[in-house]
Amino acid sequence: MLEIVNLKKYFGSVRSVDGVSFDIQRGETLGLVGESGCGKTTTGRTIIKLYEPDAGKIIFAGQDITRLTPEEMLPFRKRMQMIFQDPYSSLNPRMTAGDIIREPMIIHKFAKDEIDDRVNNLLRLVGLNSEQAGRYPHEFSGGQRQRIGIARALAVEPELIICDEPISALDVSIQAQIVNMLEDLQKSLGLTYLFIAHDLSMVRHISSRIAVMYLGKIVELAKSDELYSRPLHPYTVSLLSSVPIPDPDKSSRRKLIALKGEIPNASNIPSGCNFHTRCPKAKPECANINVKLQDTGNNHFCSCPFILGGKIHA
């Protein structure tokens, strides 16, 4: 469905996305995780071409869309949609829920006599009702607003949806409802997701595979269960050590791996392995070594240069 090859997006001297490569198979969910500021959202927005890439390739359903003009992109925008992080700022406060869902269908020239029925059906599909079509965003809760955003993304019958932290702005009690709904929609409509998040426990629940991002680069990529049971990169190990465990006994026995220092400035990224300034396993040569993702077996990719046989050399 999607192949990303050495994708780069810079804002002046800030290397937000710095040579990212991955693919997503039709019907699967790839989770993209990492700390705030690592480039996750920029990656998603560049893939869907809300930002123009500076280098690399975006191949969607076998077609290279990297350099297409906005007019040439229009047919592909129908097939690629995005659910935004903030349900408060991503909906036009001057438009009703029905108009928000209706707008993309008008842009893509859906039959006029079908649009109103589709709006009502989409509202019901996301757990709302057709009577709410005339209400404005401020009349809905956060969870309901995000449902409207999801209905808008589904309006033009996309194949791929970029989910940009779609639950991070919602109450914890609502998050599971939204994720379960996204899973149900994926099964019933045959959707493919790139699910961007920083909540590793939720990402594990929804994702087939997970890519871990740090300072504009993918540092580890593996199947979801494999990544959680056998993390290889020191950054992934540290992230997973901070995920809450509901079992008090297991939680008390687990060692929390705290990273030293702050994330370096993206306009002045460290040389060599960009994680070496915070890495508990770092060696002097890490500052000069050329790192790239390598398959360590079982399609488990890692960029740490000291991975051998599934273990990090001390």
Image: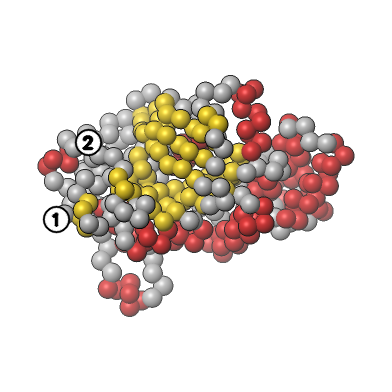
Q: Residue at 25% x, 57% y: name it.
A: 310
Task: Report the side of 55 relative to 186 (left or right).
Answer: left
Q: Residue at 13% x, 40% y: name it.
A: 285
Task: Report the side of 157 relative to 82 (left or right).
Answer: right
Q: Report the residue marked by disc 1.
A: 314
| Picture coordinates of residue 82, whole percent (x, y) | 59, 41
Q: Residue at 52% x, 40% y: name it.
A: 2
In the rendered image, the quadrant that contains the N terminus is top right
Task: Report the side of 5 relative to 151 (left or right).
Answer: left
71 or 34, nearer to the observer: 71
Badge 1 density bin: few <14, some 14–19, many ≥20, Cα 10 Å = few
| Picture coordinates of residue 136, whole percent (x, y) | 74, 45
Q: Amino acid at mark 2?
A: Asn
Q: Is residue 75 visible?
A: yes
Residue 306, numbered circle: none
Badge 2 density bin: few <14, some 14–19, many ≥20, Cα 10 Å = few
| Picture coordinates of residue 162, whole percent (x, y) | 55, 43
Q: Report the residue marked by disc 2.
A: 290
Q: Residue at 41% x, 56% y: name it.
A: 223
Q: Is residue 141 visible?
A: no
Task: Report the side of 178 relative to 197 (left or right).
Answer: right
